Image (tube, rainbow, N blue to C red):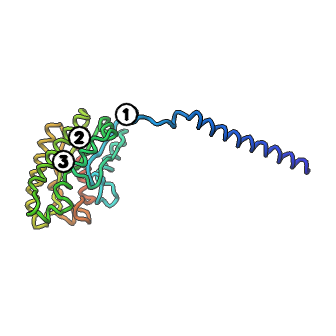
Amino acid sequence: MKNRKWYAFLIGSIFLTGTALYGLWIGYQDIVHPPERTLSVNEDARPAPEGDVFVALGDSLTRGVGSTSGAGYVQPVSRALQEDGIRSQNLAVSGARTEDLLAQLEQPEVRRTIENARYITLTIGGNDLFNRGENVDNFDSVDITQVVADAKTNLNTIFTEIRSLNDSAQIIYIALYNPFQDNENGEAFNQLILDWNASAAQFANAQRIDVIDPFAYVSDVSRDLATDQFHPSDRTYEKFADDVLFLLD
């Protein structure tokens, strides 16, 4: 009986030793002859994603900030498009201004993603005009005319750049609403936003871009805006999503 136990122990030891030695040999081969999968790949050499893609660009509205579930308008649109085999990629950055989106459009990976998109949506401009509400509260001391002029120039460049990257994609821009209607300078901003949306429509038309004008969607702050009284409420985001899906081919 003891001999059998000793024999079994000896066989097991030999097996474990052989396994360990084999593992060391494999590790040695990986160091001396690294497998191809570990080699770095030039970023420009990476294959473009295959299949139809929905790309969302812009600021916190495209990120869904203010939505109780975080879905915003992008997730409902993504779910609907997924039924047709279309993947989604949300590249929006909360707090982004027009100059930030312009900088993002210079990134190779972003450019490649846009080039392969079938549908593109974007929201941008609100952070330029409102500056977290500071431009509204300090309306008399801010050169708002210059702020709007610079942002419009950037917006036109954004539209032109996106279209130059993808001549066939359907592009939708969701314009601005006024979350500060109850502010003493709210009426003045109403006029600025109406003018902005009109200019955006003009720029967009030149680049075959559809525009959703949500100005009328915010008339009751407690109903139409989130608890932060700046971002859309679930109800307003739902309208955004319905409008986008209505426009999509």
In-image side of 205 versus 96 (left or right) = left
Q: Quadrant of the C terminus?
A: top left
Please give the count of numbered marks on the rendered protein.
3
In front of the other: label 1 or label 2?
Answer: 1
Residue that mark 3 sits on: 212
Question: Which residue is more in the foreground, 193 or 37?
Answer: 37
Residue that mark 2 sits on: 171
Q: Of the residues under marks 3 and 1, which one precedes in the sequence? A: 1
Which residue lies at the image location 25% right of the left edge and 41% below the top edge?
248
- Disc 1 marks a residue whose amino acid type is Asp
Which residue lies at the image location 18% right of the left edge and 47% below the top edge?
212
In front of the other: label 3 or label 1?
Answer: 1
Residue that mark 1 sits on: 44
- Disc 3 marks a residue whose amino acid type is Ile
Q: Of the residues under marks 3 and 2, which one precedes in the sequence? A: 2
In front of the other: label 3 or label 2?
Answer: 2
Q: Of the residues under marks 1 and 2, which one precedes in the sequence? A: 1
Which residue lies at the image location 9% right of the left edge and 57% below the top edge?
143
Which type of secondary structure does the marked residue at label 1 adopt? helix
Distance (Cα) linking label 3 and label 2: 11 Å
